[in-house]
Image (cartoon, grey):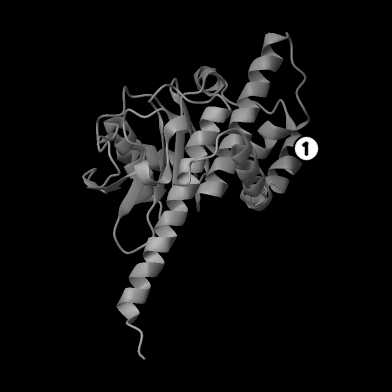
């Protein structure tokens, strides 16, 4: 008996896509669990395995704690819906931001963008993210900045956004929020967690009065130690899924 190679490849791609769908749905629910969501706004996306330039994003209108693997919308690089599990509208600003990164960075398997209050607060701070904590110092070598240009509806902004991101995995969208990009959903969410935690710590530290700054040598040393930060996902992601399974299961349908 012979096996049709093309059928095997297609089945493999379907299985790989379903795995990405489950991971992305989990990330949406984790954002809600940590209190980082913004009603139906902001967005997380992931590249669909395969030769097509397709990626998955949330249907515009669902709260993050409602997202499931099958409800995610598949769109192409032009923002056209390829497949949906019900609601098929996507946030146009989400398409602008996410398509920029997915099209400009071949290594970006996932992209996550939030309007969480502490992240927006630090994006609006004159000095941005400061080395006030070990967590922040682990982020700084991975961080870039992009100036606010208005609601991201202008496709021309994509070129400037990807230019400002460069080869970094984290970005402050000035006066707007935060963004992370990584090879896959687990890595990208891990970057997001570190960046949001660093922002939360800074907001609290600066609200207490004068802050203590570490030495430049300590900042440099921690930056060197942070080069493998994304690899922490191997430990964090399974633990996060266990947390989600205990608090808000049902995302993998």
- Please tell me whether mark 1 sits on a helix, a strand or a loop: helix
Instruction: Residue at 37% x, 68% y: name it.
Output: 11
Q: Residue 194 location, x and y as percent?
A: 63, 36
Which quadrant of the rendered structure holds the N terminus?
bottom left
Can residue 41 be seen by looking at this rendering?
Answer: yes
Residue 35, compared with residue 25, is above or below; it is: above
Residue at the image point whose x is 64% and y is 28% from the top: 198
Q: Residue at x 63, y 17 (%)?
A: 203
Camera-nearest residue between 169 and 6: 6
Q: Can you give x and y, in whole percent of width and height, for residue 185 in the image?
A: 51, 48
Q: Is residue 35 left or right of residue 150?
A: right
Question: Is 138 located above or below residue 182 in the figure?
Answer: above
| 209 over 245 or under it: above or below | above
Q: Residue furthest bottom?
A: 1
Residue underneath mark 1: 217
- How many neighbours does mark 1 have within 10 angstroms: few (below 14), some (14-19), or many (20 or more)? few
**Number of numbered discs on residues:** 1
At which x and y percent is residue 73? Answer: 31, 43
x%, y% of residue 234?
65, 53
Q: Is residue 16 left or right of residue 134?
A: left
Judge whether residue 109 can be spotted in this image.
Answer: no
In percent of the image, x 43 and y 49: which residue is there? 21
Between 125 and 84, which is closer to the camera in this rendering? Answer: 84
């Amino acid at each position: 008996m012979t096996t049709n190679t093309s059928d095997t490849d297609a089945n493999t791609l379907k299985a790989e896509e379903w795995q990405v769908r489950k991971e992305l749905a989990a990330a949406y629910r984790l954002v809600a669990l940590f209190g980082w969501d913004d009603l139906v706004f902001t967005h997380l996306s992931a590249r669909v395995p395969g030769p097509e330039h397709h990626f998955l994003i949330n249907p515009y209108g669902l709260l993050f704690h409602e997202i499931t693997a099958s409800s995610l919308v598949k769109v192409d690089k032009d923002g056209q819906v390829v497949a949906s599990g019900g609601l098929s509208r996507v946030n146009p600003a989400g398409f602008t931001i996410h398509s920029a990164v997915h099209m400009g960075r071949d290594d970006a398997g996932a992209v996550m963008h939030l309007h969480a209050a502490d992240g927006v607060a630090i994006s609006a701070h004159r000095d941005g993210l400061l080395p006030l904590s070990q967590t922040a110092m682990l982020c700084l070598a991975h961080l870039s900045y992009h100036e606010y240009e208005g609601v991201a509806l202008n496709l021309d902004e994509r070129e400037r956004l990807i230019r400002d991101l460069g080869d970094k995995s984290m970005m402050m969208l000035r006066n707007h929020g935060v963004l992370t990009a990584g090879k896959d959903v687990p890595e990208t969410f891990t970057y997001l967690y570190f960046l949001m935690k660093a922002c939360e710590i800074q907001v609290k530290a600066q609200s207490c009065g004068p802050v203590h700054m570490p030495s430049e040598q300590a900042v440099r040393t921690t930056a060197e130690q942070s080069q493998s930060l994304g690899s922490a996902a191997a430990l964090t992601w399974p633990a996060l899924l266990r947390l989600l399974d205990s608090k808000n299961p049902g995302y993998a349908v």
